[in-house]
Image (cartoon, grey):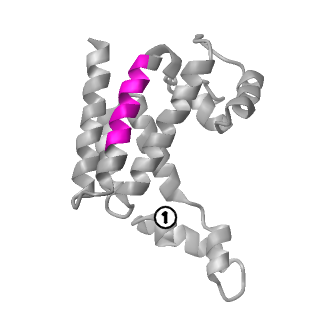
């Protein structure tokens, strides 16, 4: 359960309460089936904080994730995020807004989950208070190629380094510098 939730006592308690409603002896299969994977949500939050250039949030989420998640898993997730973003920028015409039917159709074509694609495209969901970040307005293929090279280097290095968290952090700093240089 810890791998799915992380070190959040409140979430652990909520998930235990949910499991207790099964009214039987809880098995590992029950935990796999019924406990929500909060760690994946945090990793997605980390990935979007990087691509949306919100690095104060990046450092906050990363410090929490590194307390319970393998840096190799985090690295793979960041790489997947930017590969998906590359597909979006390569195949989607940059516009100010996109319709949900278009996003849904495109999601199938690009094989990018619709919610992730919607967030990349800056789709504003009903009731959403802030204006979403439209990645197609920020990113170009050359910029993404630079970031993907950094992530490729990170993938190689993190598997051989002893201090994996430092390696991950230093490469995120490199990505930050590339994004800041692009804004200048």
Q: Nearer the viewer, residue 4 or 82?
A: 82
Q: Nearer the viewer, residue 132 or 67?
A: 67
Indicate the quadrant where residue 102 lies: top right
Q: Name the residue beneath numbered marker 1.
A: 5
Q: How busy is the neighbourhood of tag 1: few (under 14 within 10 Å), some, or many (20 plus)? A: many
**Residue 28 included in the magenta stretch of the image:** no
Q: Position of residue 29 (x, y in %)?
A: 66, 77
List x then y, in percent, for residue 21: 69, 77
Say whether residue 122 is visible: no
Magenta portion: prevailing SS class: helix
Please say whether residue 76 is visible from this viewpoint. Answer: yes
- Helix, strand or loop status at disc 1: helix
What is the quadrant of residue 9 in the picture? bottom left
Check the image and report above or below for 31 versus 145.
below
Left or right, 82 with respect to 87, comes to left
The span shown in magenta is 142-153
- Residue at (42% x, 28% y) in the render: 52
Left or right, 106 with respect to 8, comes to right
Q: Position of residue 109 (x, y in %)?
A: 73, 30
164 or 153, nearer to the observer: 153
Query: What residue is rendered at 72% in x and 79% in y?
Result: 22
Q: Is residue 177 above or below residue 68?
A: above
Q: Is residue 132 above or below residue 168?
A: above
What residue lies at 22% left-to-right and 61% top-to-bottom? 162
Query: Looking at the figure, which quarter contains the C terminus?
Result: top left
**Considering only vertical position in the picture, is 123 above or below 18?**
above
Left or right: where 41 falls relative to 72: right
């Amino acid at each position: 359960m810890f791998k799915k939730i992380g070190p959040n006592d409140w979430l652990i308690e909520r998930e235990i309460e949910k499991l207790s409603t099964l009214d039987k002896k809880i098995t590992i299969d029950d935990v796999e089936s019924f406990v929500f994977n909060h760690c994946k949500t945090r990793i997605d939050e980390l990935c979007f904080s990087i691509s949306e250039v919100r690095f104060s949030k990046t450092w906050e989420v990363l410090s929490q994730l590194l307390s319970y998640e393998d840096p190799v898993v985090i690295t793979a997730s960041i790489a997947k995020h930017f590969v998906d973003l590359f597909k979006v920028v390569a195949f989607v015409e940059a516009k100010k807004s996109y319709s949900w039917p278009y996003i849904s159709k495109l999601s199938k074509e690009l094989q990018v989950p619709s919610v992730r694609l919607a967030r990349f495209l800056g789709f504003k969901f009903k009731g959403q208070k802030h204006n979403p970040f439209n990645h197609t307005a920020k990113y170009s293929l050359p910029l993404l190629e630079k970031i993907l090279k950094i992530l490729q280097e990170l993938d190689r290095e993190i598997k051989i380094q002893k201090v994996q968290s430092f390696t991950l952090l230093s490469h995120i700093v490199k990505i930050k510098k590339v994004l800041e240089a692009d804004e200048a």
